[in-house]
Amino acid sequence: MTQVLLPSPFALEQILNSISLGLIVVDCNQIVRLWNGWVEKHSGVQSTQAVGKHISEAFEELPSRAILSAISNTLNYGLPVVLSNALHRSPLPLFQRGEQETEKKRIHQSITLTPIASEFGGRDCLIQISDSTTSIKREKILLSHSETLKREATTDSLTGIYNRRFFDEHYKMALGHAVRHNVPLSVFMVDIDYFKEYNDSYGHVAGDKALIQVASALRKQLLRATDVLARFGGEEFILMLPNMAPDSAMQFAEKLRVSVLDLNIPHIKSRVSEHISISVGFSNFYKHPDIDQHALLKCADAALYEAKKYGRNQCHYLPLQHFDAHSIQQINPS
């Protein structure tokens, strides 16, 4: 028969005071019977001061109602309780108290309460406390990295607005919603006039700066969270505005054009203005149940071609119901 050697009371006390875990035991009257070294360190209260006191009086500050209620439930009903740090960050007044700490920082805690048999009969409650501060910091870092990666995947690195990938995904959803609920959806294609000539004259660094300024001017015209602006490629931008009435689209397109012209960015090589200007083509979906998902984009692109063909620095509207993909050239002039 194997003999099990139990640690002496002195050795057991050393173990309890050495582990990186807070241990508190309260009896049926919620009087503290055990208060280990970890709790001493992070509460600032010695075990000789805490043992014999009611748990609500043992700390420098009053514990939260949540843990006092949990202790009562464990003692009354004999059921274990877990207080997760997601809902209860710091139920007990425990702090980081390292030598480098200039101010007390409350520890994020994960707490488990377990009913145990009392040596005098009845029921005690074992409170186990672990420091979850590091794991929460790690979760925040991972979440931050995840959000950064997501932002990089959906954002144009130069202008900071959405990229074409983001637009393509949200356009499908917005068009599906418009079809199902019979609400309008407007798409605007925007192209900077004679941008190649601008780059040739002022250089690509100035060209990049101009793209950023144009993107910012366009973005300022958006008023709702559902409105989307994306860089479609090169000097071309695209906007999608759900629930915009068809008769408001022309006014909005003109606002886009004027907002860029008002930037007053000199463009000596432009043949339509002394400053950078844009051409805008747009179309609108409304109650067209048999629409192909690409038809609205093609129609807006064709409208942009018309705006450029008739002189640039202007807006052109092409009704979706009148759009004939075979009769209108789809390739924009340079």
Image (tube, rainbow, N blue to C red):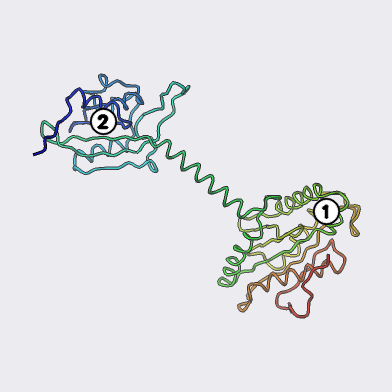
Q: How many marks?
A: 2
Given the image, on which type of amino acid does mark 2 rest? Ile
Q: Residue at x 27, y 19 (%)?
A: 49
- Looking at the rendering, in which quadrant would you find the N terminus? top left
Tell me where residue 330 sits by quadrant: bottom right
Q: Residue at x 87, y 65 (%)?
A: 311
- Looking at the rendering, in which quadrant would you find the C terminus? bottom right
Say which residue label 1 marks.
261
Residue in front for this viewpoint, 230 or 257: 230
Using a 10 Å C-alpha cutoff, classify the residue at mark 2 as few (fewer than 14 neighbours), some (14 to 19) or many (20 or more): many
Q: Residue at x 37, y 34 (%)?
A: 131
Instruction: Pick out the residue farthest to the front.
Output: 1
Label 1 – label 2 distance at C-alpha: 71 Å
The numbered dot on residue 12 is: none
Locate residue 247, reporting x and y percent: 72, 67
Say which residue label 2 marks.
24
- Contact, CB < 8 Å: mark 1 with mark 2? no
Q: Is residue 285 above or below residue 224?
A: below
